[in-house]
């Protein structure tokens, strides 16, 4: 076990950058403010986090976050920098919860910093001894959904809350008839008293099975089983019994250890929903990038995760969306180790118009492309909405401009007219 | 089940405040951008989140966070406000993971906001049907530690990593002889390969039991069992077998469902470590206040939690530390329901000098007052360090200024001379 964990940060500090980086490394490994008995040089050498690189970005005018301190020198020019630290795996073992304390624990409260964000994480493959990674990933999801050579066209059940199990099943019936490949529960609906999981899933799966019998197409339904651990395992079993092919869990709500338990138990792909990620990832000055975040969850065993979408209705930039989506398909470990690639899910304000940019950005059609209003709001109805999304991706993948494809394809033409081109 | 969940936010937006609040409520309950089939007025009435109050704070010059949008009106004056929303419990049931999706899910990524932070949360007592709250709390912790009428004087094992089980036990022996009431593992040390939990705990408990036999005082040791769920339960059992009286878990690392499982299994107080909280709580513009955060974990079952300390080495203000500490002792539910009070843990750069301010702020001695350098760095050694802390609290509780008490008490006098008064 000589492998090291490497973490890259963005920092902002008025301290000399080398000192600031050394503070980070010390606080997150051997350090305390007073050198204590038992702390030998050899021990420090073996266990201290190491500063691998400090790259200055430049001066900043005002502190991004309040509460930081100034060095005794009185120096008050703040600078931003990228800092890379590494830790010996011996400090915490191949344990994600304990890794977090080191790379994302008290660090972000250190007084020397007016900003500190975890940007990326490289983990040694020994983590694969403890974690299984995705069970299905891209290939397994495609096999279950029986969709090849294009994205899975997905949608969400809306309204989020308020519908009974029967009304939900009716809504699913409509979406099935539209021809979608993938349907997910909203993250706001798991087991509400008016729409209990144990009634919703049988009701929804009945219409999915009926549809499959008639058409030969079993649509993938990500049933939101978020809850306590025993609940989630029982709900997984119900989905399996009902012939379902996917479960969904809100990652931030359940935590990594619960995801590990779910993964070990699951016989179905796990759709990892990132709601709440904005609390961790939205600020440029604090928290954790999605690039680092998704690696933890991929290792823990999710098969899909959300990356927002190009020109989304949220506040994430396209650059960030693209980086996240590409990262999902980038191996976490070199061959012959498992790469743990997962299927990125584009969503939020998506319609036909973003297909070319999404395809160009991803360099692949290995994604779930989810639309809500972009399907249901099509002037010729939901089936035309789905068809338009398929046409848009076919055109994108063939390198044909949407405007050209729309000349021949009415559904696409109407979609572009309705949702913008 | 007619109870409602109430959440209070700080927001920053260029949109009319009433519209912005309505967007929050809509997005987090029934809403989508296009009104969909099946969404009746009655359903909206019953399940829509409700805007309870909007209180304008004032205009802000520049957006706190990037990525927000402007209203179509072209209005570009941004204002900050407090917004209170409520949800019917029927939307998600008494489930903390599913509550989170509503009150702290996609909300913080909404484009209308250049800042959005969850400040407080009021939960209906029906959550007590699902969650047990603290098992020991203040009274149970005092009973096990046999410390009454003053804070538990605590300390931490340092260096954080690098010591073998035997070296750790030696360090504990030193701390025991100093007379502390409470010793905790560092959050960085749970089960590192060079200091496995299964070897550290028996080694540490041996010296604690020896000390108890000699002195009649069994010091409370919060053994950091953070890890996967099966590991944590097994580790708890080991602590119990060894005669230990406390376990510690990093809350952010394990998640609420794992804490619920640990609480259900545990026969010992759970010391909830908040490392990583800075990622959620440090920015004034995003994330979650500790006031809201600690309620979730108290309900899930922790008995102690960290609140930082007065004049701490981190970047938290004293005002925030005090609010957090007081909140830990404030009932979450009115009588006759369980109040779920937990013991606040002061730490980080604490020495004798902060005792009066801590006592004045808390209005109580029901806390763990933890010091590291403030004990080990005392010029007359650790026992004098502990004695000085006790003297400082005795003086504070008696309303005697530290300077006066120090005239009579050498340990306190030396502590104030060393660490500042």
Image (cartoon, coloured by chain):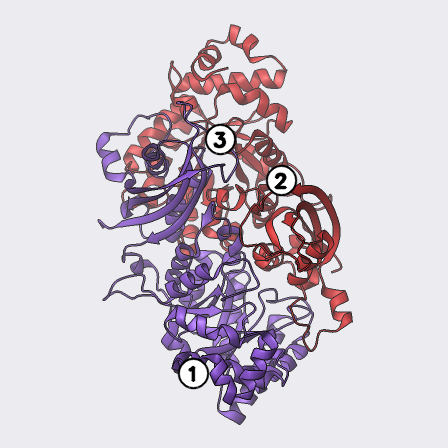
Chain colours: A purple, B red
Q: Camera-side residue: B368 or B6?
A: B6
Q: Which mark is residue A147?
A: 1
Residue nearer the viewer, B320 or A129: B320
**Residue where numbered disc 2 is placed:** B341
Q: In this view, does A285 lie above or below B396?
A: below
Check the residue under mark 2 and report the chain it is in.
B
Marks 2 and 1 sit apart, C-alpha to C-alpha, by: 53 Å
- Mark 2 vs mark 1: same chain? no
Task: Give the Cα separation between the discs numbered 1 and 3.
Answer: 56 Å
Q: Where is residue A184 in the image (x, y as percent from the top left)?
A: 54, 73
Mark linked to residue B347? 3
Q: In this view, does B344 lie above or below B50?
A: above
Q: In what element is the residue under mark 2? A: loop
Q: Which residue is drawn at 59% across and 75% down?
A: A419
Residues marked 2 and 1 touching at CB (< 8 Å)? no
Residues A15 and A95: in front is: A15
Quarter holding residue B172: top left
In the picture, measured across the screen, residue B254 lies left or right of residue A332, that is: right
Residue A93: mark in rendering: none
Q: In this view, does A16 lie above or below A134?
A: above
- Determine the secondary structure under disc 1: loop
């Amino acid at each position: 076990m000589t492998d090291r964990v490497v973490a890259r940060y963005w920092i902002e500090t008025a301290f000399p950058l080398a000192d600031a980086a050394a503070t980070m490394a010390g606080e997150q490994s051997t350090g305390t403010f007073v050198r204590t008995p038992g702390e030998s040089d050899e021990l420090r050498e073996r266990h201290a986090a190491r500063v691998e690189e400090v790259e200055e970005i430049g001066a900043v005018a005002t502190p991004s976050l309040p509460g930081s301190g100034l060095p005794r020198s009185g120096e008050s020019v703040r600078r931003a920098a990228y800092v890379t630290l590494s830790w010996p795996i011996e400090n915490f073992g191949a344990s994600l919860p304990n890794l977090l304390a080191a790379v994302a624990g008290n660090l972000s409260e250190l007084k020397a910093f007016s900003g500190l964000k975890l940007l990326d994480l490289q983990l040694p493959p020994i983590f694969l001894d403890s974690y299984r990674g995705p069970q299905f990933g891209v290939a397994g999801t495609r096999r279950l959904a029986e969709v090849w050579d294009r994205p899975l066209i997905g949608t969400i059940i809306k309204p989020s809350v308020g519908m009974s199990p029967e009304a939900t099943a009716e809504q699913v019936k409509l979406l099935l008839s539209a021809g979608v490949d993938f349907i997910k529960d909203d993250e706001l609906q798991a087991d509400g008293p008016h729409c209990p999981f144990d009634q919703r899933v049988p009701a929804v799966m009945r219409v999915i099975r009926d549809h499959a019998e008639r058409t030969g197409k079993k649509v993938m339904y990500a049933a939101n089983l978020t809850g306590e651990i025993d609940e989630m395992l029982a709900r997984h079993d119900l989905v399996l019994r009902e012939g379902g092919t996917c479960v969904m869990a809100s990652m931030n709500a359940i935590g990594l250890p619960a995801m590990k338990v779910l993964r070990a138990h699951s016989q179905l792909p796990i759709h990892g929903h990132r709601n709440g990620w904005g609390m961790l990832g939205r600020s440029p000055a604090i928290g954790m990038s999605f690039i680092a975040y998704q690696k933890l969850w991929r290792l823990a065993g999710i098969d899909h995760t959300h990356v927002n979408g190009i020109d989304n209705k949220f506040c994430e930039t396209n650059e960030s969306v693209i980086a996240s989506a590409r990262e999902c398909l980038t191996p976490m470990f070199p061959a012959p180790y498992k790469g743990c690639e997962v299927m990125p899910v584009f969503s939020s304000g998506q319609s036909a118009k973003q297909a070319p940019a999404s395809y160009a950005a991803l360099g692949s059609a290995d994604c779930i492309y989810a639309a809500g209003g972009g399907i249901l709001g099509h002037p010729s109805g939901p089936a035309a909405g789905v068809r338009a999304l398929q046409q848009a991706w076919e055109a994108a993948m063939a390198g044909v401009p949407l405007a050209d494809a729309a000349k021949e394809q009415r559904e696409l033409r109407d979609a572009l007219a309705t949702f913008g081109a």
